[in-house]
Image (tube, rainbow, N blue to C red):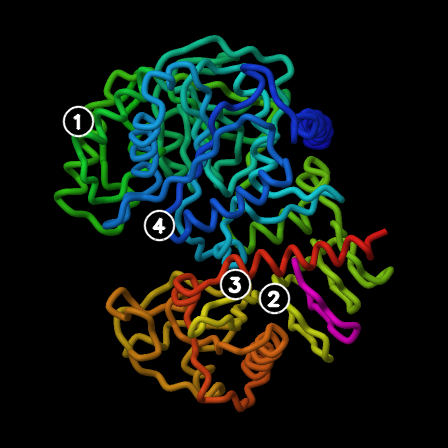
């Protein structure tokens, strides 16, 4: 049955991509596409990076003409979360458009924040990650615009909210969307373990759009059963499943309520969730008195509780309609493991999106495993099973091991990249000139894991060994000077491990020596005069325009080589 569904979704996706391609560089008729597309960013630096990339795409006429694009950086100060970004964006749109908003279809993509679990996409943004979908240069943003091509016709004017690291593949050829006030959410049948990491809707067993009973935010499997969220259809889906969240539409009246909430809370000084805080208090069987507003939150404060309760009270009574898309799948690309699995091992995903092993790249025949992906790269060496290589130049004596992610690397000398290795070269600023840092990790390394003191440092691991052991191998001293802002914790994210070099080639070769030394347990001589940066430092000093220029040059060079 899954094979039949996958074939159906493959055909549906192809239709959407074809329709979107016909609009790229052309003007669309009213209601045929979004009037406004908005991206959120966590700060001004990220916003400028997004704006530059969007301008490049606009110059190439990769969007339908006449679409208004905006990037809104979160206001400076405390983190306000994705829900806070939505509130702030609605307020900014109101300033720009006023009454005109009442007739506009708006797509809001929450794209702020820096990904610690998918570092290759964090510098330029997950929304701009390259997708190996054949010769056409597709990014996540292009795919989202294509997959949502029908939504302006489905929904009335309002704001459609999506995230930057998920993909919804669906066939809705037999569905019609009646107008509805409040919030209308799309739901996808998912295994119970997926529901524990997302939102789950409690619905009747009726077909078509229905009023939601309750919304469960990252529930346990036991909580799903007790709430009546677990379903089973023996004719088509013999396994138990739940309907999980993905994207939703906010009507004009609810948008006004959210703008009012932001005005009342301004300045917003704590994190708000666009799913848990907006949807958790909605539904016909919700009891706000029993609501645990701080569930799944590690740091609780009186102010946080006050803000969350205020939002719940203001949204009380807002209708929550849910449209179950039974012929759909939801994919998340937020981690290295998910990224590798879906691109290299998930046959259904690869078929449904047209994922190929060689996307606008040049490589020797039979040197790239069919279950790997090479994207916008010049590869004269070999790439083994289950690896992804993007925007890289690899010489003929370079061997990429299994289950690796290689991004922006330039290696011409003989090199063997061990299995399960992550390598990513980033352009950074150094005294008004450019330099390069190659970040290296093990695919399974937990970049977010943090310890509060040096005495607990032994709990951190990297490349399959204790990080303290690796520091000795690399002749680096363990002290608080090793970390960027140790007061916020000590982790792989803020550990200054990565040497800054003058050229891309030297940077990649040096970091690979450090990887090999850690794997072999042998000391390596690294110039102690070189400045070492952390991942957190790299984001503050990144030169994204230099990175984009390098990618442009590589793509242009490949244009003469790709057959």
Label 3 crowd (10 A; few <14 / some 14-19 / many >=20): some
Q: Residue 341 location, x and y as percent?
A: 62, 51
- Give the mark nearest the N terminus, 3 or 2: 2
- Give the mark nearest the N terminus, 1 or 2: 1
Direction from residue 14 to residue 327 in the image, left or right: left
Which one is in front, 172 or 77? 77
Q: Is residue 64 visible?
A: yes
Mark 1 highlights which residue?
A: 289
- Give the mark nearest the N terminus, 1 or 4: 4
Q: Which of marks 1 and 2 is in front?
A: 2
Residue positioned 49% across, 23% down in the render: 35
Q: Nearer the viewer, mark 3 or mark 1?
A: 3
- Give the mark nearest the N terminus, 4 or 2: 4
Q: Residue 97 location, x and y as percent?
A: 36, 23
Mark 4 highlights which residue?
A: 43
Q: How far apart are marks 3 and 2 (CA)?
A: 8 Å
* Highlighted magenta segment, given as a residue range: 391-402
Position of residue 233 relative to residue 447, above or below, is: above
Q: Distance between the residues labelled 3 and 4?
A: 28 Å
Q: In which quarter of the image is residue 199?
A: top left
Label of residue 444 in the image: 3
Label 1 crowd (10 A; few <14 / some 14-19 / many >=20): few
Q: Residue 115 location, x and y as percent?
A: 45, 53
Q: Is residue 237 visible?
A: no
Do the CB atoms of the residues marked 3 and 2 lie less than 8 Å apart? Answer: yes
- Give the mark nearest the N terminus, 3 or 1: 1
């Amino acid at each position: 049955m899954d094979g039949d569904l996958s074939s159906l979704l493959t055909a549906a996706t192809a239709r959407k991509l074809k329709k979107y391609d016909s609009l790229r560089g052309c003007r669309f008729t009213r209601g045929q596409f979004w009037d406004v597309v908005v991206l959120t960013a966590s700060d001004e630096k990220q916003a400028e990076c997004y704006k530059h990339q969007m301008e490049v795409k606009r110059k190439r006429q990769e969007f339908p003409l006449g679409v208004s694009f905006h990037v809104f950086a979160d206001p400076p100060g405390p983190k306000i979360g994705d829900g806070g970004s939505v509130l702030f964006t609605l307020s900014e749109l109101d300033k720009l458009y006023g009454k005109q908003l009442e007739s506009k279809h708006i797509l809001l993509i929450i794209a702020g924040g820096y990904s610690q679990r998918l570092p290759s996409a964090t510098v330029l943004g997950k929304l701009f990650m390259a997708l190996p979908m054949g010769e056409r240069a597709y990014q996540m943003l292009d795919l989202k615009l294509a997959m949502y091509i029908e939504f302006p016709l489905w929904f009335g004017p309002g704001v459609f909210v999506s995230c930057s690291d998920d993909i919804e593949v669906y066939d809705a050829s037999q569905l019609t969307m009646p107008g509805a006030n409040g919030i209308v959410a799309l739901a996808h049948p998912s295994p119970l373990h997926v529901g524990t990491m997302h939102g789950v809707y409690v619905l009747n067993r009726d077909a078509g759009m229905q009023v939601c009973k309750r919304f469960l935010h990252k529930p346990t499997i036991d909580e799903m059963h007790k709430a009546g969220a677990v379903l089973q259809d023996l004719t088509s889906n013999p396994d138990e499943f739940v309907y999980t969240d993905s994207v939703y539409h906010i009507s004009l009246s609810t948008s006004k309520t959210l703008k009012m909430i932001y005005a009342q809370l301004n300045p917003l000084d704590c994190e708000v969730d666009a799913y848990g805080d907006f949807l958790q208090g909605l539904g016909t069987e919700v009891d706000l008195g029993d609501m645990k507003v701080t569930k799944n939150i590690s740091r609780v404060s009186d102010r946080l509780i006050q803000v969350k309760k205020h939002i719940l009270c203001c949204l009380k009574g807002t209708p929550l309609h849910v449209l179950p898309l039974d012929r759909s799948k939801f994919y998340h690309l937020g981690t290295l493991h998910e990224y590798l699995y879906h691109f290299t091992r998930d046959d259904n995903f690869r078929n449904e999106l047209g994922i190929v092993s060689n996307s606008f790249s040049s490589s020797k025949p039979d040197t790239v495993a069919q279950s790997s992906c090479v994207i916008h790269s010049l590869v004269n060496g070999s790439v083994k099973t289950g690896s992804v290589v993007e925007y890289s130049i690899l010489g003929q004596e370079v061997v990429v091991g299994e289950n690796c992610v290689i991004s922006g690397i330039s290696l011409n000398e003989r090199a063997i990249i061990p299995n399960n290795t992550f390598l990513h070269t980033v352009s950074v600023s150094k005294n008004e000139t450019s330099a390069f840092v190659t970040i290296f990790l093990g695919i399974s390394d937990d970049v977010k894991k943090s310890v509060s003191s040096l005495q607990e440092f032994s709990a951190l691991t990297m490349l399959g060994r204790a990080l303290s052991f690796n520091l000795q191998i690399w002749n680096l001293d363990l002290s608080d000077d090793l970390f960027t802002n140790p007061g916020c914790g000590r982790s792989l994210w803020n550990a200054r491990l990565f040497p800054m070099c003058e050229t891309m080639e030297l940077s990649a070769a040096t970091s690979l020596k450090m990887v090999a030394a850690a794997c072999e347990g042998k000391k390596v001589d690294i110039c102690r005069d070189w400045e070492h940066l952390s991942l957190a430092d790299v984001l503050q000093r990144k030169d994204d325009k230099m990175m984009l220029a390098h990618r442009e040059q590589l793509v242009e060079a490949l244009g003469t080589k790709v057959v």
